[in-house]
């Protein structure tokens, strides 16, 4: 009897011990999971963007916490660190072997670092100098959502070499400052300053290419995406402020798949609320909350006809690509300008089955060559 009770107590104790051990093991596992979840830096849990960002400052945790994800353009960390995912490569200015175009870099404002890359076509007729013929002047604004790219990236350098050679223009590719380090309106102000620098130097120097070779009565502005937005806003500003320095007038502007957006969908534009909110958030990031998504800077369709009529140039060309989110706005832009009673000529060039600024991403495709021919023809026409 006594032996039996002892045995029962013994087996009871060992059961309790086993249960306790199991409980402790369970608790340890849960603790380990919680530790993993809360102690690992946040960005280790989110999928990493393509290309790997350089590691942040290890002693500053905020240097690795994502504050704004503007993929595939850039990522801003909580510490303020910016990782640009694209458009940071640079090529030197010089003579382009393929086209014979010569380029050089100029500083426009030492204080802000505003500069430009200038392009001059080779002399026409081989050996014979053609210093007598003045070249149309093209001021170009690169794209990149206002946050990436520069006048010095291979993509834009190649494009400007081609346009300069084929259209025989004197091109000035503006290297305006980028957001978010310099939120809007910095890009607009830099672009305006550069444009007036071109107008001034073409009239009276001292910049020799502009002074000796530029025909400023044939001044064109062009830009793709964000650069198209800038070109439009420069022509509007010229209209509001009574023109450029020295009474120089803009002959035409070419908006290549321009970056325009707005609150309400236009035409067959996407009604996907998530995607529309994303456009609002990125625009707000670009201008640091200064302008709404329906501001005329980004939504020219919000302007009354009387504003449209202030556009200070005589010709406007808008290109759109069928698979581009911005297509409907590009088309509506052309219609609104035409319907406003503005006195100039509006033209639209459409490419089927292509994405936003495909002509820069696939420069050797036949459709890109066709689009380039349109731009060249537009610059060459009287
Ligand atoms: C890293 O962050 C710490 C703390 O914020 C700072 O003191 C240090 O200067 C930073 N180091 C570098 C290389 O930026
Ligand atoms: C400049 O362009 C205007 C307008 O096309 C033209 O009439 C003029 O002859 C050109 N000037 C020179 C020097 O080529």
Image: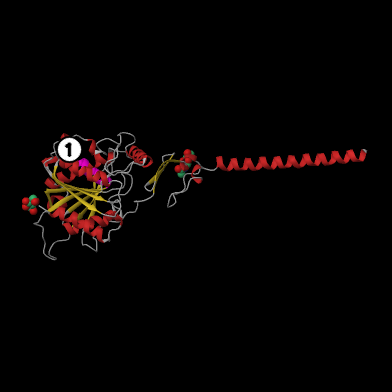
Residue shown at 19% from the left, 43% from the top: 335
As rendered, which of 187 and 236 lies closer to the eye? 236
Residue situated furthest right in the rendering: 1
**Residue 184: x percent and y percent?**
29, 38
As rendered, which of 167 and 132 lies closer to the eye? 167
Q: Using the image, determine if residue 63 lies above or below residue 92.
A: above
Q: How is the image coloured?
A: secondary structure
Q: Is residue 324 left or right of residue 381?
A: right
Residue 27, visible in the rendered structure: yes
**Residue 144: x percent and y percent?**
31, 47
Residue situated furthest front in the rendering: 268
Residue 94, visible in the rendered structure: no
Q: Quadrant of residue 328?
A: top left
- Label 1: which secondary element: helix
**Residue picked out by circle 1:** 308
Quadrant holding the N terminus: top right
As rendered, which of 306 and 187 lies closer to the eye? 306
Q: Which residues are magenta?
A: 225-239
């Amino acid at each position: 009897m006594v032996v039996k009770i002892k045995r029962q107590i013994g087996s009871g104790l060992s059961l309790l011990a086993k249960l306790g051990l199991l409980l402790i093991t369970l608790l340890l596992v849960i603790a380990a999971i919680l530790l993993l979840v809360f102690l690992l830096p946040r960005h280790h849990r989110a999928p990493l963007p393509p290309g790997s960002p350089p590691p942040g400052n290890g002693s500053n945790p905020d240097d690795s916490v994502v504050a704004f994800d503007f993929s595939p353009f850039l990522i801003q960390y909580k510490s303020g660190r910016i990782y640009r995912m694209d458009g940071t490569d640079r090529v030197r200015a010089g003579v382009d072997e393929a086209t014979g175009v010569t380029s050089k870099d100029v500083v426009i404002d030492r204080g802000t670092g505003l500069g430009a890359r200038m392009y001059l076509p080779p002399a026409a007729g081989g050996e014979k100098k053609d210093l007598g013929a003045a070249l149309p002047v093209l001021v170009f604004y690169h794209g990149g959502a206002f946050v990436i790219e520069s006048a010095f990236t291979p993509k834009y350098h190649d494009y400007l070499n081609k346009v300069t050679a084929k259209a025989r223009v004197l091109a000035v590719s503006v290297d305006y400052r980028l957001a978010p380090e310099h939120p809007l309106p910095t890009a607009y102000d830099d672009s305006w300053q550069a444009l007036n620098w071109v107008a001034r130097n073409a009239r009276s120097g001292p910049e020799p290419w502009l002074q000796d070779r530029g025909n400023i009565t044939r001044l064109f502005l062009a830009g793709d995406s964000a650069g198209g937005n800038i070109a439009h806003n420069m022509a509007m500003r010229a209209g509001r402020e009574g023109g450029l320095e020295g009474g120089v007038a803009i002959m035409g502007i070419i908006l290549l798949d321009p970056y325009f957006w707005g609150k309400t969908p236009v035409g067959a534009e996407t009604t996907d609320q998530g995607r529309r909110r994303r456009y609002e958030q990125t625009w707000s990031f670009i201008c640091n909350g200064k302008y709404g998504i329906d501001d005329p800077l980004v939504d020219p369709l919000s302007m009354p006809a009387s504003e449209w009529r202030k556009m200070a140039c005589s010709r406007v060309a808008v290109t759109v690509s069928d698979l581009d989110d911005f297509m409907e706005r590009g088309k509506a832009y052309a219609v609104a300008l035409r319907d406003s009673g503005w006195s100039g000529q509006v033209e639209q060039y459409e490419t089927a089955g292509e994405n936003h600024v495909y002509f820069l991403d696939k420069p050797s495709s036949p459709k890109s060559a066709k689009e380039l021919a349109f731009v060249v023809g537009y610059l060459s026409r009287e």
